[in-house]
Image (spheres, rainbow, N blue to C red):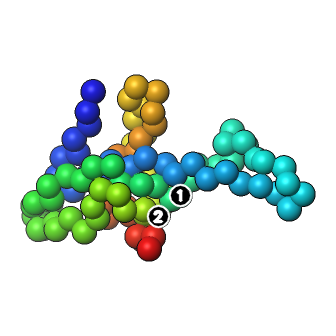
Amino acid sequence: MKLVPLADRVLLKPVEAMETTASGIILSTATKEKPVVSEVVAVGPGGVVDGNEVKMVVKPGDKVVVAKYAGTEVKVEDVEYSIVRQSEILAIVE
């Protein structure tokens, strides 16, 4: 199955970062909060949303920062994704 975002929506995949404590203990993903850095998987076409022209700024492959509880979580073939509006993206990581 393939997800294709519509309008100003962006499909994101959370970036799994392994964290290690100062003493060398590796923290599991179950003990951490939802990551705020995600990778852009797909981008909608933009267009007119709520009467305003929306130009898509992000592109697939970009790493972005999103609000902790932004978007809608979707699970496809055991992979978790988030679908957010472009306006919910706070920054692009360079």
Q: Work out whether 57 lies above or below 74.
A: below
Q: Which residue is mark 2?
A: 65
* Residue 4, label in figure: none
Residue 85 visible to the viewer? no
Q: Which residue is mark 1?
A: 36
Residue 7 visible to the viewer? yes
Q: Earlier in the sequence, mark 2 or mark 1?
A: 1
Q: How dense is the environment of label 2, judged by Cα within 10 Å: few (below 14), some, or many (20 and up)?
A: some
Residue 13, how many percent across, how many down? 43, 47
- Quarter of the picture holding the N terminus: top left
Q: Work out whether 48 lies above or below 94.
A: above
Q: Secondary structure at mark 2?
A: strand
Give the residue type that dot 1 points to: Val
Give the residue type that dot 2 points to: Val
Residue 68, how many percent across, how many down? 53, 56
Determine which quarter of the picture holds residue 48: bottom left
Determine which quarter of the picture holds residue 94: bottom left
Residue 82, how many percent across, how many down? 40, 45
x 16%, y 66%: residue: 54
